[in-house]
Amino acid sequence: MSESTRTKSNIPQALPGAFLAQQREEVLAAVTRVLDSGWYILGAEVQAFETEFARMFGYAGAIGVGSGTDAIVLALRSLDIREGDYVATVSHTAVATVAAIEMIGASPVFVDIEADSFTIDSESLARTLEAYPQIKAVIAVHLYGNPADMPSILQVAKKHGIPVVEDCAQAHGAQINGFFVGSMADVATFSFYPTKNLGAIGDGGMVVVRDPERIPKVRALREYGWMSRYISQFPGINSRLDELQAAILRVRLPHLEAANLRRAKLASAYDAGLPGCGLTLPVVRAGGTHVYHQYVVRCSVRDLLQSRLKESGIGTNIHYPVPVHLQPAYASRCGMDPHGLGATEAIAAEILSLPMYPELTDTAVEEIVNTIRNLV
Ligand SMILES: *Cc1c(COP(=O)(O)O)cnc(C)c1O
């Protein structure tokens, strides 16, 4: 087909409102229920959602908070990480992971990633922990929905006697060796930002804990440190999931598993159609269940591929174009693996996120695959 006769597609990279085509009535009923209740903060909806979320994945407890970023702040504070402490994490992540560390006055120390899984490299972590005895916790990020190598990470952290936080903002429902992400570390965090696998229609987040004894402290921390009303036991913040978001998330939660399976099916279609195009396709760890928050390929001529796809009406995105340690806010002032962050820097110029959301049609994926095949 020549350039002039090819019909232009209109396929966005993400489509956060698409679920409403199926769930509008249920969402409206939930919203109405909250409006009429006259109770808008920390009520029956948040409590029910916390219970349902914890039960679905087998967590000992779940505490609804204002955002995924706040969830990390509260997780670190629940572990008594404080001003002056160092926290190890990756530079290839949403900047939120790193911003949360600095929000409590701690300092990030960057660890490299495995180039194939895009998640934290346990050997780099071991080197970094040796080099920085001030590190008091590790945040492992299950980036793109791909579970990080938790058994190795937990082993390295245990050797140094420090706790691990799982940042599950992109990985609701992902598993490794039969364990759901969020159930392996001391504390874990989720985001319900609208494009996430489980999304609200605004901000929201969750802290989950393995030890039920940790629940009261996180609950208190999200509301001024109150153990009983108006009496602050310790300094807390205001970060509460609201009733409206909780009610909507309760509508969406029962559909999460099917939505993740749909994402995996779309990923298989990409996996089947894209070999031979000069792209490096996503790798799933042995024993891991990827939930494809993003389907990220590597391409040596990434910018060219992205602009050609855009001309064909196919949206893509780059998660993330500049590693955090090279961004203006953080450059030259943070610690890192003494061997450097080679994999992190190498992949940044090559990664491209293709369209991925449960409502993406088989026809659209076929069209994306064909367009890419025609470009090479
Ligand atoms: C989205 C995200 C966050 C932050 O969540 P917000 O709800 O936007 O604050 C943290 N970490 C990762 C990996 C994310 O993708």
Image (spheres, rainbow, N blue to C red):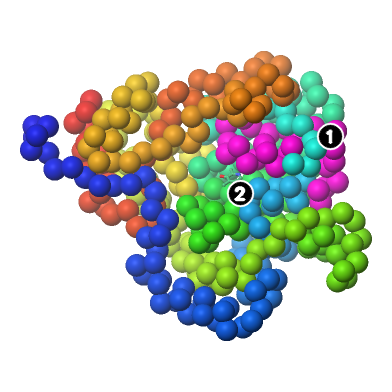
**What range is drawn magenta here?**
77-102
Q: Nearer the viewer, mark 2 or mark 1?
A: 1
On screen, residue 296 above or below 208: above
- Compare residues 90 and 183 and report the one nearer the observer: 90
Give the label on residue 85, or none: 1
On screen, residue 246 above or below 277: below
Give the residue displayed 28% in from the left and 41% down from the top.
314
Give the label on residue 168, or none: 2
Locate the C terminus and report the quarter of the image it occupies: top left
Give the residue displayed 64% in from the left and 28% down from the top.
329
Give the residue displayed 72% in from the left and 28% down from the top.
109
- Give the amino acid type for the residue marked by disc 2 in the picture: Cys
Q: Secondary structure at mark 2?
A: loop
Residue 252 appears in the rendering: yes
- Compare residues 357 and 373 and report the one nearer the observer: 357
For label 2, the crowd category at 10 Å Cα-Cα, with few meaning under 14, some 14 to 19 and many 20 or more, is many
Q: Earlier in the sequence, mark 2 or mark 1?
A: 1
Q: Give the x, y percent position of residue 184.
A: 69, 50
Give the residue displayed 91% in from the left and 66% down from the top.
231
- Give the amino acid type for the residue marked by disc 1 in the picture: Asp
Is residue 91 magenta-colored?
yes
- Cα–Cα span, label 2 and label 1: 23 Å
Residue 158 appears in the rendering: no
Q: Is residue 88 left or right of residue 289?
A: right
Q: Give the x, y percent position of residue 283.
A: 46, 36
